[in-house]
Image (cartoon, rainbow, N blue to C red):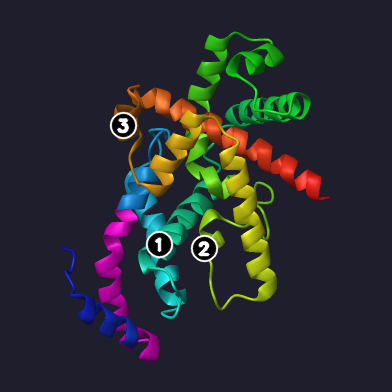
């Protein structure tokens, strides 16, 4: 059962935990914020293979919540929920990577499409259409949409993969890490601000539907089904648009990084 705490009680709990590292205070904070884990796990589970149990995602996410509570700085100018959601998702993603849940054939298809975006964007100096991507790959538009559907659950890592340095990414920066921290070093602040600017520029170069889907999903918290209702399309179509947006972002950010070298 979720413990319903008033703001004053919540602040006192945080103060008690940070001042004395009291286990009782930490346990109550975990109980209070536990619904965040279920929320994040539910969103991550969208499009995953049925072999991935949502209960497992919740258990992975709890480690992220524990880490967030232990590391959260009360003087930061952000809500704990904002900070924690990024850490919870990161813990789930890390575990999914560890168990290598994406088949190699699916990863290979995603890389092929991503490289096609990179090649055509460099040649056309704009985002290529689906038909142009299909022509580049020597397949029909219908076959391309089928590929988008098959690789759609790769989008679960979305921004974490998009702005990281490699698949495992030692020193990788997640989307949550771009949240400003006034106590961060000037070097780290510069790097994170640069990352945010690159991400914003890449998003602005996406098509209108891709931008809408990313905005509604990541910033407004809508489900794919709810976004489908807004756009008047099916949930599976929204999933395809989301996947295409992620691949395009990876392509655009890779190009931006090359330009900086």
Quick one: quadrant of the N terminus? bottom left
Which residue has dot 1 on it?
Answer: 82
Q: Do the numbered discs 2 and 3 sit on residues whose CB atoms are within 8 Å?
A: no
Q: Are marks 2 and 1 in contact (CB under 8 Å)?
A: yes
- Mark 2 and mark 3: Cα distance apart in space: 28 Å
Indicate which disc residue 179 carries.
2
Residue drawn at x 56%, y 55% is 174
The image quadrant of residue 18 is bottom left
Q: Quadrant of residue 25?
A: bottom left
Spatial CA distance of label 2 from label 1 is: 9 Å
> Residue at left 60%, top 33%?
247
Local SS, label 3: helix
Q: Residue 124 at x, y = what percent? A: 74, 24
The numbered mark, 2 or 1, whose residue comes first in the sequence reads 1
Horizontal and vertical percent position of residue 95: 50, 52
Q: N-terminal of the two: label 3 or label 1?
A: 1
Helix, strand or loop under label 1: helix
Q: Is residue 62 visible?
A: yes
- Residues rendered magenta in the picture: 16-38
* Front disc: 2 or 3: 2
Q: Secondary structure at mark 2?
A: loop
CA gap between label 3 and label 1 equals: 23 Å
Q: Which mark is residue 225?
A: 3
């Amino acid at each position: 059962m979720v413990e319903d705490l008033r703001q004053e009680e919540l602040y006192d709990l945080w103060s008690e935990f940070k001042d004395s590292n009291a286990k009782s205070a930490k346990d109550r904070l975990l109980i209070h914020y536990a619904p965040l884990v279920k929320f994040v796990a539910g969103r991550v589970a969208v499009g995953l293979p049925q072999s991935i149990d949502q209960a497992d995602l919740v258990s992975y996410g709890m480690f992220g919540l524990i880490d967030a509570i232990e590391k959260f700085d009360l003087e930061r100018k952000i809500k704990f929920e904002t900070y924690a959601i990024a850490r919870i998702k990161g813990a789930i993603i890390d575990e999914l990577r560890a168990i290598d849940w994406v088949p190699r054939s699916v990863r290979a298809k995603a890389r092929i499409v991503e490289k096609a975006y990179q090649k055509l964007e460099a040649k056309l100096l704009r985002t290529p259409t689906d038909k142009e991507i299909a022509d580049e790959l020597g397949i029909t538009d219908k076959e391309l949409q089928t590929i988008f559907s098959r690789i759609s659950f790769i989008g679960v890592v979305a921004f974490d993969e998009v702005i990281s340095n490699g698949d495992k990414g030692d020193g990788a920066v997640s989307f949550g890490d771009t949240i400003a921290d006034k106590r961060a070093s000037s070097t780290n602040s510069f790097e994170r601000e640069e990352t945010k600017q690159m991400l914003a520029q890449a998003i602005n170069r996406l098509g209108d539907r891709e931008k809408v889907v990313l905005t509604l999903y990541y910033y407004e918290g809508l489900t794919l089904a709810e976004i489908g209702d807004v756009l008047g399309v099916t949930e599976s179509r929204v999933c395809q648009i989301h996947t295409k947006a992620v691949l395009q972002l990876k392509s655009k950010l890779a190009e931006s990084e090359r330009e900086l070298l």
